[in-house]
Image (cartoon, rainbow, N blue to C red):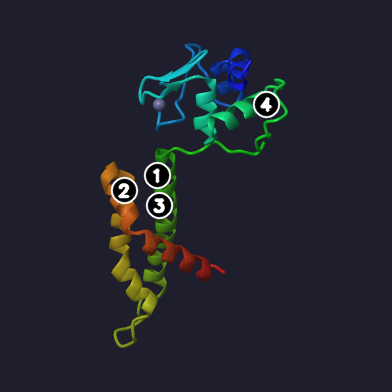
Amino acid sequence: MSLFDTVKSNVTTRQAVEFYGLKINRYGMCVCPFHNDKNPSMKVDKRFHCFACGEDGDVIDFVSKYFGLSLKDAAIKICDDFHISRDEKYKAVSKTLKPKKSGEQLFEETCKYYYKVLSDYLHLLKKWKIEYAPKDEISEWHPYFCEALREISHVEYLLDTLLYGDISDRAFLIEDCKREVIDIERRLNELTL
Ligand SMILES: [Zn+2]
């Protein structure tokens, strides 16, 4: 029997989905890992099918896509994880693989990262606005005070967009503010050293 047939006759997609830690509800559905799924849209049985994004296939397709492996490596991994004997000529696949993240997951994580950096910065700016406020009319304005006056509303606007903006606004912001957010993060790290 070929490697692929061996795998498919021994392991259903449902077994693999459970083995790799996804929850299956009593209707045999799970949250689809291949799109930004909120409710279980993926039916898993011998094969799988997502009613939302249309991903479909057998257990090897699932594992291949989930871990970002070639079909052959996915089949080898399933054999080894389920202790199915296989031809020794196939090289074992690393055991420490992490599920591959979907584009949507990466996007959400980037949004969260931007939000964290920018809200830390806003917090600091608000502190500076008070702490470095000029004591009297003749003293020179502290650069931190000037920065606070200049940046607070801009940073608030960015945070609002990250929270309430639609996907295209957020995508635009992420592209547009990459340099700025990286610089802010580096500065925050230096300031808190
Ligand atoms: Zn899906």
Name the residue tied to disc 2.
171
Question: Residue drawn at (66%, 38%), measured in percent from left and top?
Answer: 94
Closest to the observer: 152 or 72? 72
- Residue 20 versus residue 115 in the image, above or below: above
The amino acid on which the numbered mark 1 sits, given as a three-letter code, is: Phe
Please give the residue where the numbered disc 1 appears in the rendered image.
107
User: Where does the image place residue 95, in percent across and percent down from the top left?
Assistant: 67, 36
Nearest to the eye among marks 4 and 3: give it: 4
Q: Which of marks 2 and 1 is nearer the N terminus?
A: 1
3 and 2 marks in contact (CB < 8 Å): no
Instruction: Say if 72 sits above or below 170 in the image.
Output: above
- Amino acid residing under circle 4: Asp
Q: In this view, does 118 lie above or below 8?
A: below
65 with respect to 93 (left or right): left
Number of numbered discs overlaid on the protein picture? 4
Q: How far apart are marks 2 and 1 (CA)?
A: 8 Å
User: Which of these two is toward me, 4 or 172?
Assistant: 4
| Distance between mark 4 and mark 1 Cα atoms | 30 Å
Which residue is at a point 70% across and 20% down the rendered structure image? 84
Q: Does the residue labelled 1 lie within 8 Å of ligand 1?
A: no
Residue hosting label 4: 81
Residues tagged 2 and 4 counted as in contact (Cβ below 8 A): no
Q: In which quarter of the image is the C terminus?
A: bottom right
Residue type highlighted by circle 3: Tyr
Q: According to the image, label 3 marks what residue?
A: 115
